[in-house]
Image (spheres, rainbow, N blue to C red):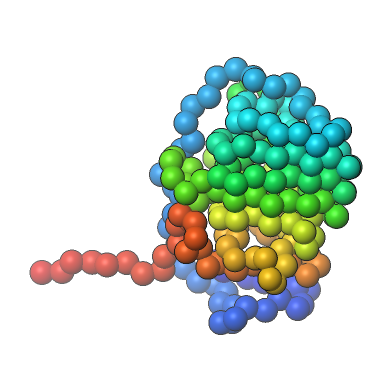
Amino acid sequence: MVGGVSPGAYGITADYGIRTGIRPVADPYKDVEPPSFGTCTENNFQANKSETINPGVYCGGIAVHAGATVTLNPGIYYLDGGDLAVNGNAGLTGNGVTLVFTSKNRNGFATASINGNATVNLTPPNYGPTAGIVMFGDRRMPAGTSFKLNGGASQYFGGAVHLPTATINFSGGNGSGTSCTQIVGAIINFSGNSNLAIDCSSYQTKPFGMWTVRLVS
């Protein structure tokens, strides 16, 4: 950590310990930019029953209500304003997807709110402009924008959750199902029995690097 761990953050452990006050490392995604997009393909999308949807521009967000499960076909989903809201006892699944949180056709930047007992299982594309990234926050997003990823043990984001200006509240992941979840945020608050792992060999997620190579004469 470039900063530190809150004195009240008891119970946080890491296989190789926690180092604080380290020098900043380069953002591995600093040169990544999702393709440009046009007008809305969906407005204020809400799912009250189980269905499958396609990539596009979802203005006003995506809401999945209790009892419904939305399956995402592979591709890039632009959430333009509004929230990705997955309520308790709802589901959101998809392989080969990137959710981009942005603002173009609507006022305000899209965020996410995933509630307890929601079932979330998303993995990123293995190729293309957003390879290895499952969630991507527009760099113009105001500092401190809140993302609540509190799905608990049945929540899994494979690959990188790249929200560099956001405050991320995270509670999720289980020991057996978590292989690669890489979180980039300004402030990250962990709660509950959160588990993260960074064995990203099955994805094209870029590693964090602390070493540089110089040629000297």
As drawn, the residue found furthest toward the left would be 217
- Quadrant location of the C terminus in the rendered image: bottom left
Q: Quadrant of residue 136?
A: top right
**Location of residue 172 in the rendering, given as x and y in whole percent from the top left corner:** 74, 61
Q: Locate residue 195 relative to residue 197 in the image: left or right.
A: right
Position of residue 130 relative to residue 49, above or below, is below
In which quadrant of the rendered image does the N terminus lie?
A: bottom right
Q: Residue at x 81, y 32 (%)?
A: 47
The structure residue drawn at horizontal position 18% and vertical position 66%, both measured from the top left corner, is 215
Q: Nearer the viewer, residue 126 or 145?
A: 126
Residue 72: x %, y % from top left: 66, 38
On the rendered structure, is 141 left or right of 10?
Answer: left
Q: Is residue 179 left or right of residue 189?
A: left
Give x and y (percent) for residue 208. Answer: 46, 63
- Residue located farthest toward the bottom when viewing the structure as drawn: 16
Q: Is residue 31 left or right of residue 176?
A: left
Q: Is residue 12 above or below residue 90?
A: below
Q: Position of residue 191 (x, y in %)?
A: 78, 65
Q: Is residue 82 above or below residue 158?
A: above
- The answer to whether one can see residue 204 in this image is yes
Q: How many marks?
A: 0
148 or 159, which is in the foreground?
159
Residue 143 visible at all: no
Q: Is residue 151 above or below residue 45?
A: below
Choose between 3 and 190: the one closer to the eye. 190
The residue depicted at 60 percent of the width and 31 percent of the height is 55
The part of the image, by quadrant, that contains residue 39 is top right
Residue furthest to the front in view is 51
Q: What residue is drawn where x is 57% and y is 62%?
A: 180
